[in-house]
Image (tube, grey):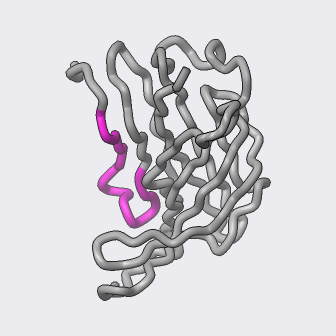
Amino acid sequence: MVKKGDYYCLYAIKLSDYKKTKLEYWAWNVPVYKDLEINPQYNNMEIYGINAFEMQVTPQESYRIYFRPMSLIKGGNNPINEGDTLNMAPESISQAELSVLVNGIKAKIVTINKVTEYARGIYLIGYEAQIIKPSNTSEILKETERVAGFDKITIVLDSKETGEIGKGEAFVRITE
């Protein structure tokens, strides 16, 4: 039994595979107020650090989503020094490679931008995408996967550059 509340993240990993054949699955901002079903799926591309927010313009029809794809192939074991850039992300991501779902319905991607993030003394490469929220998404997910007052955002990246697939999810509080 998990105590009710908002959880910063949930991750799934099989330690015997980690950094050898697979990385991790992450879900972010997980609201646990009832039985909640999360089906972690992970491969050799990790989708890390997902953050999503509505643009401050009405109508609030879109989300801007930040995520950091981390490739097992590109990761390597090279030492990283302060001020270095750790680039485990694909060099580019096309709309054909990226799927974003809101409550199980595929969203229209309107922009994808490569960005640089600073953390713990180094620079990291991530991406941000803006999507148009699909309408009528509340009945698509199974009841056990839905949380009232939240959108569940799923990101799936199928990188043509590395041949890797990754999935991550985040919950976003719906503003009315």
* Horizontal arrangement in the rendering, residue 60 relative to residue 50 (left or right): right
- The answer to which image quadrant residue 80 occupies is bottom left
- The answer to which image quadrant residue 10 occupies is top left
Q: Nearer the viewer, residue 111 or 152?
A: 111
* Residue placed furthest toward the front: 57
Check the picture and name the quadrant holding the N terminus: top left
Residue 11 in magenta stretch: yes
The picture places residue 72, in percent across and down from the top left corner, at 48, 68
User: Residue at the spot x=52%, y=55% of the render?
Assistant: 67
Range covered by the magenta-colored residues: 7-24
Position of residue 10 relative to residue 31, above or below, is below
The picture places residue 59, in percent across and down from the top left corner, at 70, 31
Q: Nearer the viewer, residue 114 or 75?
A: 114
Q: Main secondary structure of the magenta part?
A: loop
The picture places residue 42, in percent across and down from the top left corner, at 49, 48
Position of residue 28 relative to residue 46, above or below, is above
* Horizontal arrangement in the rendering, residue 132 relative to residue 12 (left or right): right
Q: Nearer the viewer, residue 57 or 125?
A: 57
